[in-house]
Image (cartoon, rainbow, N blue to C red):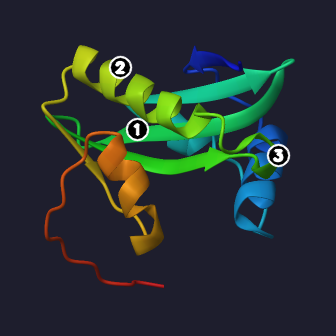
Amino acid sequence: MPELRIDPFPSAAELNALFSAAWGTLAPRDFTPILSRSLAHIGAYHDDRLVGFINVAWDGGVHAFILDTSVHPDMRRQGIGTRLVREATRVARERGAAWLHVYFEPHLTGFYRACGFRPTKAGLIKLA
């Protein structure tokens, strides 16, 4: 079972490799400025290789937001994603968040409901 690490600050190469495997070809980027402002982020490591990741952004107050939930395709269906969400929930609560939000595509509804999220209505504007 992969080890979960809180605030591991993975390298850009590690995150780009995971995101590329999990989501397809994405433009490489440096995540340091993003992670340095996050409430928390959690990495799942198997043999010191990043195989899962979740970022918990926040508004500086009581609202936290799950972003970038990712599990390497070779490691899916082992409960890693659920463990990441549960740990993100625990850490966000421990660090003072009162609300945890997540936005997701319809095919992930069952996953997030199983993690304890209830449906809400929200709005979205695509800016780019």
Nearest-to-viewer mark from 2 and 3: 3
Quadrant occupied by the N terminus: top right
Mark 1 is surrounded, within 10 Å at the Cα level, by few (under 14), some (14 to 19) or many (20 or more) other residues, namely many
What residue did someone put label 3 on? 74
From what the image shows, is residue 6 above or below residue 13? Answer: above
Residues at circles 2 and 1 in contact by the CB criterion of under 8 Å = yes
Camera-nearest residue between 121 and 9? 121
* Amino acid type, label 2: Val
Q: Is residue 105 left or right of residue 63?
A: right
Q: Which picture quadrant has residue 71?
A: top right
Q: Quadrant of residue 81?
A: top right
**Mark 1 and 3 residues: CB-CB less than 8 Å, in contact?**
no
- Secondary structure beneath label 1: strand
Question: Upstream in the sequence, badge 2 or badge 3?
Answer: 3
What's the residue at 18%, 52% (across, down)?
A: 118
Residue 18 in percent (x, y) is at 77, 47
Q: Is residue 126 above or below residue 40?
A: below
Name the residue nearer the viewer: 55 or 27: 55
Which residue lies under the disc numbered 1? 56
Query: Which residue: 46% across, 70% down?
Result: 107
What separation in Å lies between label 1 and label 3 (alpha carbons)?
A: 24 Å
Q: Amino acid at mark 3?
A: Asp
